[in-house]
Image (cartoon, grey):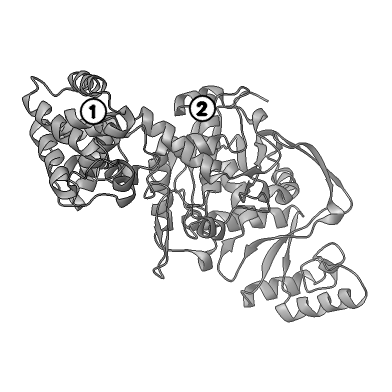
């Protein structure tokens, strides 16, 4: 087989918000394509019209864009294999379903729901497990049990028929999966899946998936392990069409598990434990709102880094990896077979690391928007400087204002616990004297303030921690924030002195304890 250009696809159904497990599938496809100089396609599998949700397709496209997963070909960008929505390709599928009937790999079935239920009950009464297989297909009204004339009559007069795959009897299907290794399944355990439904003139997932992957020249199918049971049918479909030479390689990814490891991660787990399971906020047509990582204050780079390491490792102990580094290191051989347990605290840790590394100007854009919602104006220079001081302490982007509000508005009250702990003995008097010193100081930059404060405290034999915490209380209103010297430099001389004097006036100077 000649070497083909790597082509992978992410093919979600627009049935609601995109779960982070789906984002990880898209990410692994993207990393694999980029690592191997290939193409990443986005195809929308919307043949199940009953489950279609308005807005879901746009949500999928926006989610990938936010994550930095660039689509080379597909619904959002077009390409030579358009259209990329299966609902716009439905005329194709009947032709291929009929080809399988012609070749003896499929047949027409006319059974009603009532007939199916009756035969199911017969099997149960006999202690057998019901399956639509080689035995059943000849007991029910199908083109295998009816005459050619009757089959033709039913096809022309009715539209409740389907085309089913004719599963071979007692055959071992040999399959190779890049993640799972070699697997053998006997066809006696498989049933005759529906491939096409005349009622809505649409294929099922199995037929559309195979036909589109073939026509779009997909070389590797990288998808969730929930599709592993479908692999024998898909392998047989490639054989039935005579497409074995160009059949893609398969890789089935492990599940994302609940934090306690007990089953697949769901929205309910996120709601219960307080974290999102979707990349972006999702508002359903019914008005239900689900949280998203973007709106919860996560940087896309942190989200992608965290997600990449859930089920894959680079072969060493690296954790912080850029998209370029992920691409350079990615291989399907390092994807785990076992499910990956989701750790919400680890997700927060990743985000904190990325905020620390984040450009101050970028953070300033975010903080400016938060200041605007609070009706606060600030100079760009000050906002950038504040971001440089607080980013070491931030875990979420949504915390930027809460971590920095005191830089922009003076405290209106003082934390009672902090007052009780530090605003006593000689500390208030020291704060008053320091205000006078700062007012007369030649400069208020951080270095000058460190010299002034340490010199004053040491010269007067005062407890360093007590005085510094009293200063923090006066400037901030509580015990939070970066270093005192940096706070003073950022506030400036006038505002610093005003806050220190206000604290002394408001809290008073109590008599030292005897």
Q: Nearer the viewer, mark 1 or mark 2?
A: 1
Packing grade of label 1 (10 A; few <14, some 14-19, many >=20) is: many
Instruction: Give me the residue at 65% from left, 29% from top.
Output: 334
Observer-nearest residue: 127 or 301?
301
> Considering depth in this image, is 358 or 256 the residue closer to the camera?
358
Q: Tally the numbered discs.
A: 2
Answer with left or right where residue 187 lies relative to residue 290: right
**Residue 266's image quarter?**
bottom right
Looking at the image, is 485 positioned above or below residue 291? above
Label at residue 326: 2
Mark 1 and mark 2 in contact? Answer it, CB < 8 Å. no
Q: Is residue 312 visible?
A: yes
Q: Which residue is farthest front?
A: 514
The answer to whether one can see residue 26 in this image is no
Relative image position of residue 139 (x, y in whole percent): 85, 72
Q: Which type of secondary structure does the marked residue at label 1 adopt?
A: helix
x then y, percent, for residue 43:
49, 47
Q: Is residue 481 left or right of residue 50?
A: left
Q: Mark 1 sits on what residue?
A: 486
Name the residue: 21% across, 45% down: 510
């Amino acid at each position: 087989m000649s070497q083909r250009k790597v082509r992978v696809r992410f093919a979600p159904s627009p049935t609601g918000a995109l779960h982070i497990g789906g984002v990880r599938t898209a990410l692994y496809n993207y990393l694999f394509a980029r690592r191997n100089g290939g193409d990443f396609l986005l195809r929308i599998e919307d043949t199940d019209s009953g489950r279609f949700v308005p807005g879901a397709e746009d949500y999928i496209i926006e989610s990938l864009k936010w994550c930095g997963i660039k689509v080379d070909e597909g619904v959002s960008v077009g390409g030579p294999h358009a259209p990329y929505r299966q609902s716009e390709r439905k005329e194709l599928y009947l032709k291929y379903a009929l080809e399988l009937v012609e070749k003896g790999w499929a047949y027409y079935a006319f059974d009603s729901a009532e007939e199916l239920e009756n035969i199911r009950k017969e099997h149960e009464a006999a202690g057998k497990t019901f399956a639509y297989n080689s035995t059943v297909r000849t007991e029910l009204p199908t083109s295998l049990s009816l005459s050619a004339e009757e089959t033709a009559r039913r096809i022309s007069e009715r539209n409740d028929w389907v085309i089913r795959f004719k599963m071979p009897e007692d055959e071992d299907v040999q399959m190779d999966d890049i993640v799972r290794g070699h697997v053998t399944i006997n066809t006696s355990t498989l049933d005759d899946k529906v491939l096409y439904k005349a009622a809505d003139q649409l294929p099922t997932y199995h037929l559309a998936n195979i036909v589109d992957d073939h026509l779009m020249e997909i070389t590797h199918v990288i998808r969730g392990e929930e599709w592993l049971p479908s692999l024998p049918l898909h392998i047989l479909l490639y054989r039935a069409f005579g497409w074995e030479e160009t059949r893609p390689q398969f890789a089935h990814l492990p599940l994302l598990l609940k934090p306690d490891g007990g089953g697949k991660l769901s929205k309910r787990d996120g709601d219960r434990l307080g974290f999102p399971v979707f990349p972006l906020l999702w508002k359903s047509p019914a008005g239900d709102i689900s949280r998203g990582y973007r709106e919860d204050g996560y940087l896309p780079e942190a989200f992608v880094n965290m997600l990449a390491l859930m089920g894959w490792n680079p072969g060493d102990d690296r954790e912080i990896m850029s998209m370029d580094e992920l691409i350079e290191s990615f291989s399907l051989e390092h994807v785990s077979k076992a499910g990956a347990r989701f750790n919400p605290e680890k997700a927060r840790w990743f985000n904190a690391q990325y905020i620390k590394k984040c450009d101050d100007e970028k953070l300033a854009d975010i903080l400016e928007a938060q200041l605007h919602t609070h009706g606060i104006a600030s100079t760009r220079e000050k906002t950038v400087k504040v971001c440089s001081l607080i980013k070491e302490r931030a875990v979420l982007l949504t915390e930027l204002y809460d971590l920095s509000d005191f830089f922009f508005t003076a405290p209106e009250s003082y934390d009672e616990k902090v007052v009780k702990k530090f605003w006593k003995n000689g500390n208030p008097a020291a704060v008053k004297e320091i205000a006078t010193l700062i007012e007369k100081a030649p400069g208020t930059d951080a270095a000058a303030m460190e010299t002034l404060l340490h010199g004053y405290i040491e010269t007067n034999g005062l407890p360093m921690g007590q005085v510094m915490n009293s200063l923090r209380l006066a400037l901030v209103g509580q015990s939070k924030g970066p270093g005192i010297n940096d706070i003073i430099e950022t506030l400036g001389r006038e505002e610093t002195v005003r806050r220190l004097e206000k604290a002394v006036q408001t809290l008073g100077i109590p008599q030292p304890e005897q």
